[in-house]
Amino acid sequence: MTALASLTFLYPWVLAALLTLPLIWWLLRIVPPQPKSVRFPAMLFLYRLKKDEQSSATTPWWLLLLRLAIAALVIIALAGPTLNYAEQTRGEGEVIILIDDGWTSAQSWDELQATFDKLAEENMRDGRQMYVVAASAVQGEATPALQPLTDRQAFGIASALEPKSWTTSYSDLPALLPRLEAFSNPEFIWLSGGILPDDGAPALREFLGALASIGPLTIYHAGEPAISPIIKTPTFAGEQLTVPLVLPTGAEAISGTLTARAGSGQILAATPFAFDAAKTEADVAFNIPNQIRNDIRRLEISDAGNAGAVFLLDQRWQRRQVGLVSSEATQIEQPLLEEVHYLTQALAPFFDITRGPLDELLQAGQSLIVLGDTATLADSATLALSDWVRKGGVLIRFAGPKLAHASGELVPVELRSGNRDLQGAMSWDQPMSLGPIPPSSPFAGLTIPKEVTVTRQVLANPSPDLMGKTWAQLEDGTPLVTAAATGAGWIVLFHTTATPDWSNLALSGLFVEMLREIGNFGQYVGGSLAEQRRLPPYQLMTGFGRLGAEISLAEPLNTAEIATLPLDRFHPAGYYGDENFNIALNIGASDASYSRFDPAGWPGTLRTFDVSALVDLMPPLLLAALALVLIDQLISLYLQGRLPTFRRAAAASAILLAVGLVSLGHPEVTAAQTRTLESDERILAATLDTRLGYILTKDFEIDTMSHNGLVGLSRQLRNRTAVEAEEPLPVDIERDELIFYPFLYWPVTPDFPALSEQAIRKLNDYLRGGGTVLFDTRNQNTTSLYGDLYNSPENIRLRELTARLDTPRIHQVPADHVLTRAFYLMQTFPGRYDGGDLWVEDTSENQGNDGVASIVIGSNDWAAAWAVDADGRYQAATLPGNERQRELAYRFGINLVMYTLTGNYKADQVHVPAILERLGQ
């Protein structure tokens, strides 16, 4: 009954033809059946003649009903019967679909996308012009262009669109209204998830009200959304990590698991959590040793699938090592017990402290060393410390009576010469407060307590660059903290003591925060201070909470603005910086609050996401009519006495009819059985022999070239190496298992279909499990058509396909990479085309899978260079074209397969002498 309730006819006027069924009955009734043809002698025919009057023969009533059923089925099928047709205004004007693709829609994205696909299919069937607007693209004065879409473009946008890692700016949406008002007869559809930011809901309500005044409006939302908590800023206290979780207002209390992961994805800790009824906040505590704490790069709620349920950790949450010079070494005259006490108290919340003599700390490789008030160091200690700073170390010094009378070595600025007796001119009647922090200082943004005062300090000599080296100052402008770059490192000097003798700074929380900021700053040294404060985008997060290399429109991050910087299209959530130092932006770091979507009070028509599959009943009805026609033909043959002559044809018809009816009644069972048989044969073939695989693109020519290319490469592997590679196998990325193939060749096409969540999971498992994929865009020869290779349709589609994968950072193949010597020694990697760059995963930080790259990307069309036919003849010419180029293409393929199968053993230094000897020959 539910299915019948959703029955819709696309062309209901065709049903009027059912009124002709009585006429068809009458016509069939008066038409006699075809006469029989019988062989007979003439006398026998005359003998059997009957003289009494008889009525004419007619078609049997049951055969009439059968033929009427055939006619009725054809009429109903032509009327376009459809199940689960979307409920929307059936008009003739334009359809504008606006998609809220902020991170709040991520958890309901599959339902949103299914609803969009259904709406797009139905509108295209109705012949209505479609426009699609991604709400995240509207920000400030930037508004997307409204272009009419073809069928292919509409479905392409639907498959490529993904939620973003920021909240849609609803206050900017009214900028679209002038363009939307220009349509003559529009219908608007708004698709959004089940969560809304509290500060943006009024603006969205006002915008949708304006749309409803222009044309019919339908709002689709997640009816019963699975809402996960938002991870807020975690805190460390000793070895305990406390992670606050906040549920959007109106969400039901849930339970789950919070995991802490390393940069490689390894789970370091996992803790279950549960919200109490009627509460929206919960704290989750991890007890994590300090040795493991520094490895945590990501906190996430399992199976949440949105950026709000992920919190990225950077160096600010790591517990760094700092060396605190103790009393007995480096020829320091007196113990530093009092300074050590205050410095230990200030550094302990954020650093692991190692105490010891200066020479031992230098040998231990500390990145930060704190040196209290000291006199002149020994020459050997000074040279060693200077060399350590130039190589990237950060030295933090404090002034005092000893430094006031020292020679002034290893200080960032020139100290005032002569008598530095602080009991004279350096004594003040009234203690002096701190002045404003310079904007370029790492301390910018710290709150200066009014009670912090300084009674004595060591003065710096005035110089043109003194202000640029000042990180903190007093009210009168004299420096309190100065710093200067020395080589790759820094020297930082507090012009007062680390004890309360000269200032109460050491007793304040500001002192702790200053040392913490210097520690953070010490992770990113080199260059000018302005350059260090501006971090480029490094790894950005998608709305699903996955990190990727796609940067898009993201701009560099000014670290001084982290506390107030809103997440938007120019500053998405993710990492900014480089592999040595990076800062994370997180959704949970802001004070924004969220609520579950409340259907009350919204304009237009409200509907929940329609995930029911659109079922077109025309094909099965026509198939049923065809089956009845076959039955009618068999009956007619029987009535004519000709069935024995057509016994074979009747048997074939019966078989076709049975297959058709089974397929009509149970299509999923037949497909599943076929897949099972095919899967079993494929698994046996892939496990019993070594076979290369290639991804099917559904393009016959490309798939044929991929198959023949891997056939040619497999032959060369058998002829030249110990690898006995058999016939390659095609791989359907949505259907087939990938774990049986050590190497997959993937030709990227502009119209390659979007990957489902199941395919994404299989690919991620395959890449993490040691498999290697060669993405070949095959477009090196068409670079000039698009101005830039990266703007070609194949490369754009490649970025869209890999955006949802856990893709690592990639770089061009370096000259010493194992791929250049896995079997053959080579530095170029031509295929059918030459000159394209080859990109591989950067495995310098992750030595999993024996350091073998899981992703290789190029554009030289290697399959075409490898391809041979059944007689071993090459199928494609190389460009510019010579046999040496084809030979190098085969060598690259062999190197890649050997690299995949044998691991990274060629990187072992034991092979270097042999390789150098070979190069010398």
Image (cartoon, grey):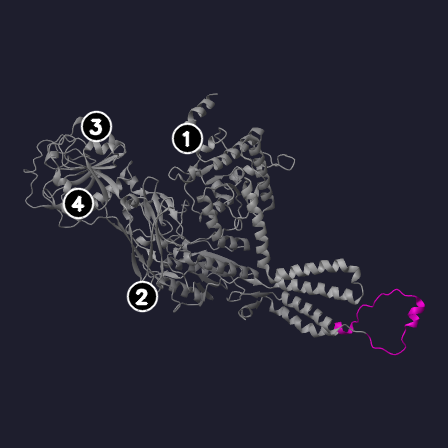
Q: Nearer the viewer, mark 3 or mark 4?
A: 4
Mark 3 = which residue?
A: 383
* Between 137 and 615, the one nearer to me in the picture: 615
Q: For the residue labelled by badge 2, is the local secondary structure a helix, a strand or a loop?
A: loop
Mark 4 = which residue?
A: 345
Give me the residue at 16% from left, 46% from top. 435
* Between 494 and 393, the one nearer to me in the picture: 393
Q: For the residue labelled by badge 3, is the local secondary structure a helix, a strand or a loop?
A: helix
Given the image, on which type of amino acid does mark 2 rest? Ala
Crowd band around label 3 with a 10 angstrom C-alpha radius: few (<14), some (14–19), many (20+):
few
Q: Is residue 629 above or below residue 850?
A: below
Mark 1 = which residue?
A: 908
Q: Is residue 691 above or below residue 57?
A: above
Q: Nearer the viewer, mark 2 or mark 1?
A: 1
Given the image, on which type of amino acid does mark 4 rest? Gln
Q: Is residue 172 above or below residue 493?
A: below
Q: For the residue labelled by badge 1, is the local secondary structure a helix, a strand or a loop?
A: loop
